[in-house]
């Protein structure tokens, strides 16, 4: 597919730094890294292949400083064309190792001539250097030219105009905003909007930014550039703040998850090419790839939601299941109680069934069967729910996530669940595989939870994928998740509303430990007071358990004052009692709210007795 056409509908994942990886492998920064194209091409090709295997759709040639002016200090100016052609050929060969189209971008950096100082003949000299390098890269087989790490707008514009006169492939132009030079930019009137407009005017096909400050600083630049132009926007962020060595920016040490989180935000802000700059490596790109799949799933869900829906009216909620009936009751005598019950690791369900019998005897109304919780492979939640129901007659609520199945697999599973009479669902996006113990598994994420809710709503209307007429209606009661304690509460409210619009009938919340967080969430969703909510309650088993939940489990936050209470309990037994007491206190507060339809209890480490102790509060 044509590079620019691909950008209209998809996000292209670039690669990370070349210099950072070479330095980490013992090649000192006083070397001319570009000369390695001739001296050690196998080393360069190996790094390219690592980026391809990490998920890159675009890899950059090892030619950033391979213009005739920069190579002069190494005595290599006469080898400019040779170095660039070989760099392009190495990258092109590495790109062939993937089963998909990998674009090769010819990397071009500044010449080092400070054009603003009006050095005599500097413009002509720089222009000639850009033309020579660009022609050599195209001869070597690149698909696109990427001009990057330019601190001078004059030189970047000159580079774009020079390259455009000698090659007929797309040109990506990236300006570097250095937070340390903000006063200079301000005095020259250089803003993201002005940079975007000037780059469009001089002929750039893609405009963007790279390097400079760390990931956070580039987010507002991406947002402002995306609003200022219809051209695709690119961003290659450093892992952290970088330092200059021999004309090359070097950044050492950072968290891949930190960079990946900002990559997700760049995508949401409108960036179409996202990669890593100084300090990033194949591990960083692999992590960005995982994070971007969630964004792509959300974007697919938005398109999916707008498509034609079924024409049949769904079965009334109260006729779909006992849960559906109870959700519609107006004069409810007590709060409903559901307990999470993890499926077995193997094929023996006896322990799970005994746990359900204990909970049923203790007054629990439903059991929730999670879907591979924490991305750990367990028995299918649908199979577990069927075994539990047949053995105990307890009504189940099946968690079903988007992580492991494409749309076809989801529809097939759900139709099977309906045929078995298992109609209560809790639809979630799911933890990424990296969270669990099978990190080699590939996440699917065709859609996110909002798209999945919409799919199930269609099934309830008698329509399947591609608007196929199913000649019947499923009777699913659709649940969704919410997090009253979310750090980004505005984004949480937006998704809460989107889930309702997609067809959610009720919500289960993440565990809540402070009444004020729940009250804030209820106030912000007051217009949806007709939608039943089950509030999550998780008794903390120990201080170590609390720290694990806070630091390692996505979506979980344990407030500082709750952590302090757990720390004040000296022994593990005292900590367990404190955890139960905190949960009981929260439960007593929760049941006072008319908005709360029920309680969603999590047994710590499968200890159902702890759940029953908490239930004594009601």
Image: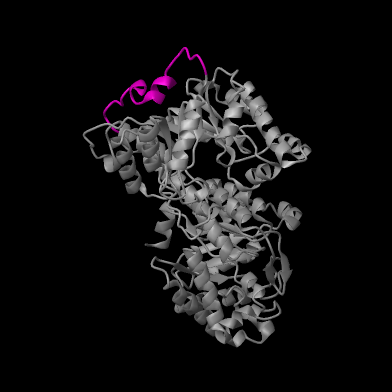
Q: Is residue 553 found left or right of 8 in the rendered image?
A: right
Of residue 226 and residue 425, the one placed in the foreground of this image is 425
Main secondary structure type of the part rendered in magenta:
loop
Which picture quadrant has residue 73?
bottom right
Which residues are the magenta region? 310-334
Is residue 311 a member of the stretch shown in magenta? yes
Identify the residue shown where x is 65% and y is 60%: 239
The location of residue 235, given as percent across then percent down, is: 57, 57
The answer to whether 190 is drawn above or below residue 159 in the figure is above
Whether residue 212 is in magenta: the answer is no
Residue at left offset 66%, top offset 32%:
580
Q: Is residue 197 above or below residue 137?
A: above
State the quadrant of the N terminus: bottom left
Colouring mode (rainbow / by chain / secondary structure / one colour): one colour
Q: Please name whichever residue, 257 or 498, is drawn nearer the observer in this view of the structure.
A: 257
| Residue 297 drawn at (x, y percent) | 44, 47
Q: Position of residue 228 (x, y in %)?
A: 55, 47
Q: Which quarter of the figure is the C terminus placed in?
A: top right
């Amino acid at each position: 597919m044509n590079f620019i056409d691909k950008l209209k509908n998809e996000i292209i994942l670039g690669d990370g730094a070349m210099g950072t990886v070479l330095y980490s492998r013992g090649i000192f920064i006083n070397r001319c890294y570009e000369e390695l194209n001739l001296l050690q091409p196998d080393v360069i090709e190996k790094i390219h292949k690592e980026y391809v295997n990490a998920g890159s759709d675009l890899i950059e040639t090892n030619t950033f400083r391979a213009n005739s002016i920069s190579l002069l200090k190494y005595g290599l100016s006469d080898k400019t064309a040779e170095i660039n052609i070989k760099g392009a050929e190495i990258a092109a060969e590495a790109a062939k190792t993937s089963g998909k189209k990998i674009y090769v971008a010819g990397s071009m950096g500044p010449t080092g001539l400070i054009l603003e100082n009006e050095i005599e003949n500097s413009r002509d000299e720089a222009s000639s250097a850009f033309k020579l390098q660009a022609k050599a890269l195209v001869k070597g087989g690149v698909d696109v030219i990427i001009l990057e790490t330019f601190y001078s707008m004059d030189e970047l514009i000159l580079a774009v105009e020079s390259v455009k006169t000698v090659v007929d492939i797309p040109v990506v132009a990236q300006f570097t905003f250095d937070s340390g030079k903000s006063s200079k930019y301000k005095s020259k009137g250089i803003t993201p909007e002005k940079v975007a407009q000037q780059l469009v005017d001089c002929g750039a096909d893609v405009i963007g930014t790279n390097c400079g400050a760390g990931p956070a600083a580039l987010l507002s630049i991406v947002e402002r550039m995306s609003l200022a132009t219809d051209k695709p926007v690119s961003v290659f962020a450093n892992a952290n703040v970088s330092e200059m060595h021999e004309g090359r920016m070097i950044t050492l040490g950072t968290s891949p998850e930190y960079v990946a989180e900002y990559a997700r935000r760049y995508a949401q802000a409108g960036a179409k090419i996202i990669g890593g700059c100084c300090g990033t490596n194949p591990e960083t790109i692999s992590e960005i790839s995982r994070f971007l799949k969630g964004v792509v799933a959300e974007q697919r869900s938005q398109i999916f939601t707008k498509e034609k829906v079924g024409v049949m009216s769904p079965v009334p909620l109260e006729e779909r299941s006992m849960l559906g009936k109870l959700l519609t009751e107006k004069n409810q005598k007590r709060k409903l109680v559901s307990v999470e019950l993890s499926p077995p690791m193997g094929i023996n369900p006896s322990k799970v069934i005994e746990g359900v019998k204990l909970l049923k005897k203790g007054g629990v109304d439903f059991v929730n069967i999670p879907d591979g919780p924490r991305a750990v492979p367990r028995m299918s939640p649908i199979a577990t729910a069927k075994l539990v129901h047949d053995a105990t007659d307890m009504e189940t609520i099946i968690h079903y996530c988007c992580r492991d199945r494409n749309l076809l697999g989801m529809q097939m599973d759900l139709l099977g669940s309906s045929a078995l009479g298992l109609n209560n669902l809790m639809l979630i996006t799911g933890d990424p595989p990296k969270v669990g113990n099978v990190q080699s598994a590939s996440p699917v994420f065709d859609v996110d939870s909002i798209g999945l809710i919409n799919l199930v709503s269609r099934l309830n209307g008698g329509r399947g994928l591609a608007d196929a007429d199913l000649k019947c209606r499923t009777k699913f009661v659709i649940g969704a998740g919410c997090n009253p304690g979310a750090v980004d509460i505005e984004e949480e409210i937006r998704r809460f509303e989107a889930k309702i619009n997609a067809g959610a009938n009720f919500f289960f919340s993440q565990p809540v430990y402070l009444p004020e967080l729940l009250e804030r969430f209820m106030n912000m969703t007051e217009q949806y007071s007709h939608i039943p909510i089950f509030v999550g309650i998780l008794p903390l088993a120990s201080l170590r358990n609390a720290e694990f939940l806070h630091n390692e489990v996505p979506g979980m936050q344990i407030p500082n004052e709750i952590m302090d209470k757990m720390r004040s309990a000296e022994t593990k037994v005292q900590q367990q009692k404190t955890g139960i007491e905190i949960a009981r206190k929260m439960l007593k507060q929760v049941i006072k709210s008319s908005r709360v339809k029920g309680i969603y209890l999590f047994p710590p480490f499968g200890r159902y007795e702890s759940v029953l102790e908490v239930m004594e509060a009601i």
